[in-house]
């Protein structure tokens, strides 16, 4: 009997650096081979920019698969959900002619981000800055405080929106706690109950039709033979457990969390695709061993920043830029169990006289070949570089491996060797069609 069941093939897409690797474009490119796309962690602090036929679309909470007609999109229980932002994003997509509500399914178990989470998030960052402790570099969207309430077992969840009396009771208790912190410790004003409650109940009517048992839906879709794409947000080095703590996000960004954050078993995760820029960027604070001078005109870092248009999708902040760190990539590959890599933004390296790649570090008089676990040790690391001749030919828009410049191919081949993982795809531009395919993740 079991041999007659058609089971789909599922792919997890995760960032292997500090986010902003180009995951949205890759998910969009692979969506025609999937019947469902799932977000399994993070919140609207993630930003996925898609360029389709020259038109740019920025998504923060809704899975990138929404840009393909007929594809089901799921927001899993591991996501923290700001209902105001969600409906704003839906309305923007609808104005652009994208049908959303009939194919977006939201887990009832998602914790809610409410106005006091945002207030606490911003006030904490301001306090850290004035006290001299150094900002974490959060987006100020309330993500961290919402995850704290989840772990403390006091969060309001999407399912609470269906029960006004229950919602009101939990909201009063939670608001009292956060107002105590806002007024006493953070020296800010208190937030009022009624406006928050009234707004939540208004939003509830729009969200209720999209509430779903996402884990069970994914289970049934898998048994029916559907392919599912799990879309990670942020990047491995921002993972709350495995990243450059405390300069990290508040969720697990690694591939293994696709199971817990969507409500499925790990046996449903078949292929782990690691998205990696051909160089490295980072938004916000925290150690960055290969960082270059990127604000000074005429430098390599400035070239990466300007040619790569390195500004955050969510915040608009300039991204710090540096050479590819293959020793950090090695750490990410181990943590995620990466099956294959997708190298993005190769075209940004076009025209450089030489290209460098970090293959290890000098740390306290010793040579190591993998990113350390301690942020202070990472700050003390001096990168060990290999240097490669650059290429003058353009790689922009190339769709065949053999048509890449020889030096570009040699650089990518060395990345594979150091990382110990094959390259499955190469992105040569922002449009969905600017892609070289070497091994399709949906084909066994």
Image (spheres, helix red, strand yellow):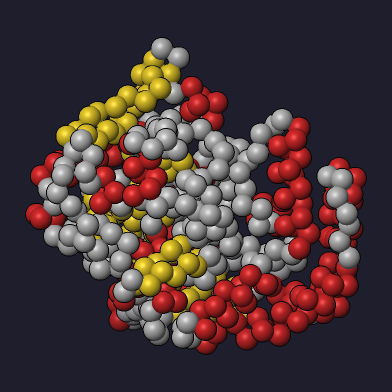
- Foreground residue, 110 or 375? 375
Q: Is residue 349 visible?
A: yes
Q: Which residue shows up at 48% across the image and 76% down it?
A: 73
Q: Position of residue 231 (x, y in %)?
A: 44, 63
- Foreground residue, 435 or 354? 354
Count of numbered circles on the image = 0
- Foreground residue, 2 or 442? 442
Q: Quadrant of the C terminus?
A: bottom left
Q: Examine the rendered structure and indicate whether residue 18 appears above or below residue 385.
A: below
**In-image side of 369 versus 90 (left or right):** left
Which residue, as the protein is rendered here, is positioned at the far top?
Answer: 365
**In-image side of 1 versus 258 (left or right):** left
Q: Which residue shows up at 47% across the image and 45% down it?
A: 319
Name the image quarter holding residue 14: bottom left
Q: Which residue shows up at 70% across the image and 44% down it?
A: 125
Q: Position of residue 303 (x, y in %)?
A: 34, 42
Q: Which residue shows up at 78% across the image and 59% down it?
A: 116
Q: Position of residue 39 (x, y in %)?
A: 50, 66
Name the image quarter holding residue 10: bottom left
Q: Position of residue 183 (x, y in %)?
A: 89, 49
Q: Is residue 27 visible?
A: no
**In-image side of 444 versus 216 (left or right):** left
Q: Examine the rendered structure and indicate whether residue 444 appears above or below residue 391.
A: below
**In-image side of 65 versus 150 (left or right):** left
Q: Quadrant of the N terminus?
A: bottom left
- Foreground residue, 216 or 409? 409
Which residue, as the protein is rendered here, is positioned at the far front?
Answer: 297
């Amino acid at each position: 009997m079991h041999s007659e069941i058609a089971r789909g093939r599922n792919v997890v897409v995760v960032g292997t650096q500090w986010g902003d690797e180009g995951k949205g474009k890759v998910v969009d490119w692979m969506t025609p081979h999937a019947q469902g796309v799932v977000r399994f962690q993070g919140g609207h602090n993630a930003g996925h920019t898609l360029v389709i036929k020259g038109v740019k679309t920025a998504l923060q909470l809704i899975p990138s698969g929404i840009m393909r007609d007929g594809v089901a999109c799921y927001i899993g229980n591991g996501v923290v959900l700001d209902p105001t932002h969600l409906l704003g994003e839906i309305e923007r997509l609808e104005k652009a002619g994208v049908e959303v509500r009939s194919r977006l399914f939201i887990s009832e178990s998602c914790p809610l981000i409410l106005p006091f989470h945002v207030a606490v998030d911003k006030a904490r960052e301001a306090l850290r800055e004035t006290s001299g402790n150094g900002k974490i570099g959060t987006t100020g969207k309330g993500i961290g405080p919402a995850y704290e309430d989840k772990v403390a077992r006091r969060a309001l969840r999407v399912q609470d929106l269906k029960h006004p009396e229950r919602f009101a009771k939990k909201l009063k208790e939670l608001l009292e706690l956060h107002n105590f912190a806002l007024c006493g410790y953070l020296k800010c004003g208190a937030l009022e109950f009624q406006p928050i409650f009234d707004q939540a109940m208004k939003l509830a009517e729009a969200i209720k039709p999209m509430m779903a048992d996402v884990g069970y839906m994914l289970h049934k879709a898998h048994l029916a033979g559907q392919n599912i794409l799990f879309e990670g947000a942020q990047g491995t080095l921002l993972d709350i457990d495995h990243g450059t703590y405390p300069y990290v996000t508040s969720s697990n960004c690694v591939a293994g969390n696709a199971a817990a954050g969507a409500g499925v078993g790990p046996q449903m995760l078949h292929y782990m695709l690691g998205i990696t820029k051909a160089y490295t960027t980072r938004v916000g604070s925290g150690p960055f061993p290969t960082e270059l001078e990127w604000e000074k005109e005429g430098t390599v870092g400035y070239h990466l920043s300007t040619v790569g248009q390195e500004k955050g999708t969510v915040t608009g902040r300039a991204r710090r830029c540096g050479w590819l760190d293959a020793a950090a990539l090695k750490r990410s590959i181990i943590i995620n169990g990466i099956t294959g890599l997708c190298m993005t933004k190769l075209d940004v390296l076009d025209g450089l006289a030489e290209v460098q790649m970090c293959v290890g570090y000098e740390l306290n008089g010793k040579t190591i070949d993998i990113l350390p676990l301690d942020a202070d040790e990472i700050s003390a690391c001096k990168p060990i570089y290999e240097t490669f001749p650059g290429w003058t030919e353009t790689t922009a828009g190339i769709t065949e491996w053999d048509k890449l410049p020889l030096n570009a191919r040699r650089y990518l081949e060395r990345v594979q060797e150091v990382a110990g993982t094959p390259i499955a795809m190469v992105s040569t531009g922002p449009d969905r069609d600017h892609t070289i395919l070497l091994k399709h993740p949906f084909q066994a």
